[in-house]
Structure formats: structure tokens, C-alpha cells
Image (spheres, rainbow, N blue to C red):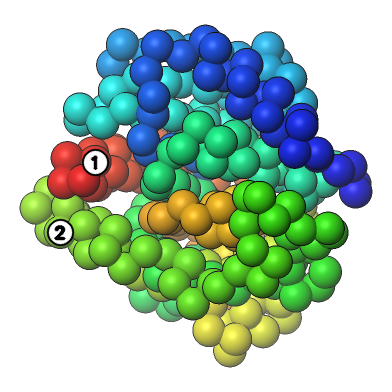
Amino acid sequence: MFEKITLEQIKEAAAEVRSRLAIAPRVGLILGSGLNTLADSVENAQIIPFRELPHWPLSTVMGHSGQLVVGNLEGQPVFVMQGRVHYYEGYSMAQVTLPVRVMQMLKIEILVVTNAAGGINPNFVPGDMMLITDHLNLAGMAGLNPLIGPNLDEIGPRFPDMSQAYDRLLLDLARGAAKKAGISLQEGVYAGLSGPSFETPADLRFLRVAGADAVGMSTVPEVTVARHGGMRVLGFSGISNKANLDGSTITTHEEVMEAGRVITPKMEKVIRGVLRSL
Ligand code: HPA
């Protein structure tokens, strides 16, 4: 789980993608569990299965298809990751974040990430959409930061600033887009854990006092690498279940996928609105 990715490997993967693309994408999207049908709306789509790309990590989880969809959405050239991999699948942090490095090599300016998350904030209900205003890098605090290891100075600084991990201007565009579409948007802090086991009630009470509004098993590594590489980031959580702080209910992957079907149309409207206003 400490498989390194070299700059040469990143460049090889980027060169392969670039050689196949007819357009130069400006916005990258990573679509989370149950939320990846947005890729089906991309116009003039060029589709590249991840397995055709060198060094690319392949998802092993139900609900994550594995292909790159590049085309236009609301007039913006977009690079959509239909499916992502997670650390818990056994990939190293470097492998999990390789697609973000490739986006950086392709000079993509903005990363939009989505995920399914458990709602810790008591005001959240399944089906809600949450704008991520900040995150808790719990995996990072436990020593799982994708930037650990020799720094590649040519692609980012040793000690990147994370004071504005989620871009303030993009947050405002998302609020505006939601308002215009009549969609109520929750806001909050996303806590990133490694998974794959769901949290214990004690874990969840700890996360709540630590300031988390939602919890999930992805996103934070990709956002960390994107910021290291100088990309601007916008993130959304689809609240798929209520985190079970008192141990009275159980959480299943099936309910996470089911909630995605309710959340996807809202996500799509808000993301389209943001793309229109860029
Ligand atoms: N916990 C962690 N990850 C998740 C959850 C959850 O409750 N729901 C969706 N992803």
C-alpha cells in the first residue's frame, strides 16, 4: 500500500490521455458512489476506459464504473472521472491521486469532486446535498497524506497551504447556482476517513465534537493533491444516510447507492449552473 508513482509515470499517463483527446479540458470532475450518471450528459463525449491507460488505478467497488469521459458540459470542456478508487481498496495514496496529477499535467484549472457521505449534522437528512466548505484530514493526521515522501518540487511546494482548500469564489458560484435552480444546499465540513468499515457510534460522536458535518471515505486525498498542484477545488457531498450516533440503525452500501439516485439530479443542476457561470 506504499506503491510509489514517479513523475515519469504521471507524464506517461498524461501523454497517453493527451494523445487521445480532441479538446483541452479546463474542468476536471471526480464523481462519487452512486453519483456518476452525470457523465452520461457530457456532449461530444470521448470515452476512454481506465484500463487502457498506463498506471491508472482500477476500481474494485460496486457502483463505480471506470472510464474517463471528456467532452462538453454547458459549453465548458470537461474531463470526467466516472468512478474513482479509494485507499481502502488497497491502492497507495499516490495511486489514488494519480488522476489528479494527470489533470494537473493537462493544465486543468478547476477540480470538482463529489462523494457520498454520512450526515453527522443533525439537521441533515438523506437526499440532502452539502457544499463542502472545509475538510478534516483524519487519514492525513494518522499518517496517510498523499504528499508524504520526497517532494516533487516541479509540481508543487513541500508545505502547501490548505487554508482555502475549497475555493471561495467557486463556493459562491455554487451557492448562486443552487439558488437559481431552487435547490436547497447544506454546507459543512467533510471528515475523510480511510474506511472501509463504517464508523462506530463512538467514532461518530468524536467526529461531531471535532466539527464534522459529514463523513466519508474519499475526496480528501484528491483535494490535497489538487491544492498542492495549484488547482482550484469545489466539492459536494451527497448525504446518503444519517450517521448513527447512538447505534440504533445500520448503514449499508445499498442505501448509499439508492440515495445517489435522488441526489444526482440536484448535483447535476448545481454543477451545470457553476459551469455556466465560469
Ligand atoms: N460513513 C462513511 N462513508 C460513507 C457513509 C457513512 O455513513 N455514507 C456514505 N459514505
Q: Nearer the viewer, mark 1 or mark 2?
A: 1
On residue 258, which mark appears? none
Q: Is residue 168 visible?
A: yes
Looking at the picture, tell me which residue is in the foreground, 110 or 38.
110
The residue sitting at 80% across, 39% down in the picture is: 6
Give amino acid for label 2: Gly
Residue corresponding to mark 1: 275
Residue 180 in the image: state x and y as whole percent. Answer: 9, 53
Residue furthest to the right in view is 2
Count of picture labels: 2
Q: Is residue 60 left or right of residue 277?
A: right
Looking at the picture, tell me which residue is in the foreground, 263 or 193.
193
* Element assignment for label 1: helix
- Between marks 1 and 2, how big is the CA–CA gap? 12 Å
Image height of 111 relative to 134, above or below? above
The residue sitting at 67% across, 44% down in the picture is: 97
The residue sitting at 29% across, 58% down in the picture is: 170
Image height of 67 relative to 109, above or below? above
The residue sitting at 15% across, 59% down in the picture is: 176
On residue 176, which mark appears? 2
Image height of 225 relative to 144, above or below? above
Q: Is residue 223 left or right of residue 114?
A: right
